[in-house]
Image (spheres, rainbow, N blue to C red):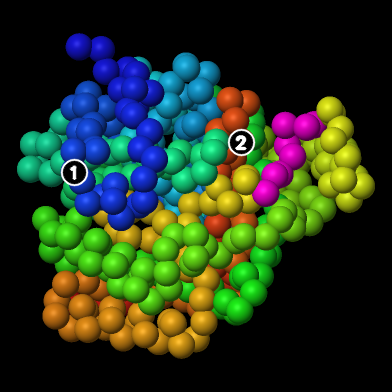
Amino acid sequence: MNTRFFYNNVPIVEDSFIDIISNKKRFQKVPEDWYVVVSDIENSTEAFDNGKYKDMNNISASTVAVAVNVASENHLQIPFIYGGDGSTAVVPKQILKEILGELITLRENAKNSFDLNLRVGYMSVEDIKEANKEILVTKFLVTEGYTQAVFLGDGLHYAEEKIKSDKRLQTRLDIEPHPLNLEGLQCRWDEIKPPKRKPEALTLIVQSVREKMDTKTYLQVLHDIEEVYGNFNQRHPITSKNTFRFLGFRTLIHASKIKFGYVNPFYILIQFSKAFVHSVNIALNLDLILFRHDDYTEELVTATDTLKIDGSLKTIIAGTYSQRQKLLAKLETREKKGQILFGHHVSLSTTLTCYIHKRNQQYVNLIDGTDGGYVQAAKELKAKIKEI
């Protein structure tokens, strides 16, 4: 059976996140002839400590962009999860080699331009199943124009850990250098303050200790979050209109290095011209046809990956100091009971790091707590795991 269009045909679910993961029937098993492709920055904590967070984050966003663009060129949709130091995509075998080729080129550019080591590997869903693990996926309608992949099961986490630890699963294909297709990717680094009367942003990573119990455990944690912070909309860290800043030369230089592996003056000039026209468009509240596909709208700003599950639960929440203390107390109780481990980071704002836009009106803002919320939370979580 041809499974090429499997994810294209997965129905979009219009319901709350909690209701979706409460009902396993909403999910479908990923076909055995698909592959999990993992890209991540090695020694990311050290890179963060050395001040390379933005470089690391831009490269991570680029791993998503190149994979999504390869899929789009083949009229396919693929599910993915983005992290501050990498990403994981699940792809059909028909485009596996092409995606790996793009990621290998990106790996070379990351090493040559930023001295960062991008690890790239893959594992078949068939091998994951033989290890008695499974990957279930569905599509969650977050807002108009943005559907997010939601994963259940222990297979994704298993594949990520195996790929990171086993060099035999890390690809070494020999690819000719070429410019990467990063269409739709913009990294602006727009700092956004939380909504009124919610002065802080909490970045949280929760990992179930017992993988087979992950759905039940994560549901309990989500209920804890809702009890303290309210529903998805009430705790969303972004509710205001677009607040991005003008795209600077430093950002464009980074983009050029990622795309070409070197500084391309012609590319920078073209992109700077686009950014200038777009900035005037917003400042004067115009509706210019030129570069209109880059326009941010209020709906687009809310299309952010603020809540996701990929073997662990990751979320960014806006609230108060008192709310944070109440939630951390609940999580610490669950931790003492041996149900979970968690890491967290608190900031006074969030940062819309990068933005991926497709011509078919699919888009997503990649968000993080300012000062590297997910990296900081992961650092705390890793320390706890080492203590076990």
Residue 120 seen in the figure: no
Q: Which percent across, then down, holds residue 245?
A: 79, 56
Q: Secondary structure at mark 2?
A: strand
Amino acid, disc 1: Lys
Disc 2 marks which amino acid? His
Residue 209 — which label?
A: none
- Quadrant into which the N terminus falls: top left
Q: Is residue 339 above or below residue 333?
A: above
Q: Is residue 274 left or right of residue 256?
A: right
* Picture quadrant where residue 181 is located: top right
Residues rendered magenta in the picture: 291-298
1 to 242, vertically: above or below: above
Q: Is residue 127 magenta?
A: no
**Nearer-the-camera pick, 54 or 15:** 15
At horizontal 16% and vertical 41% (from top left) the residue drawn is 134
Question: Which residue: 35% across, 52% down?
Answer: 17
Q: Nearer the viewer, residue 63 or 81?
A: 81
Residue 263 place in picture, x, y as percent: 75, 41
Furthest residue toward top: 1
* Label 1: element kind: helix
The answer to whether residue 293 is magenta is yes
Tally the marks: 2
**Location of mark 1 (residue):** 24
Within 10 angstroms of label 1, few (less than 14), some, or many (20 or more) residues? Answer: some
What residue sits right under mark 2 in the picture?
357
Residue 30: % across, % down: 23, 31
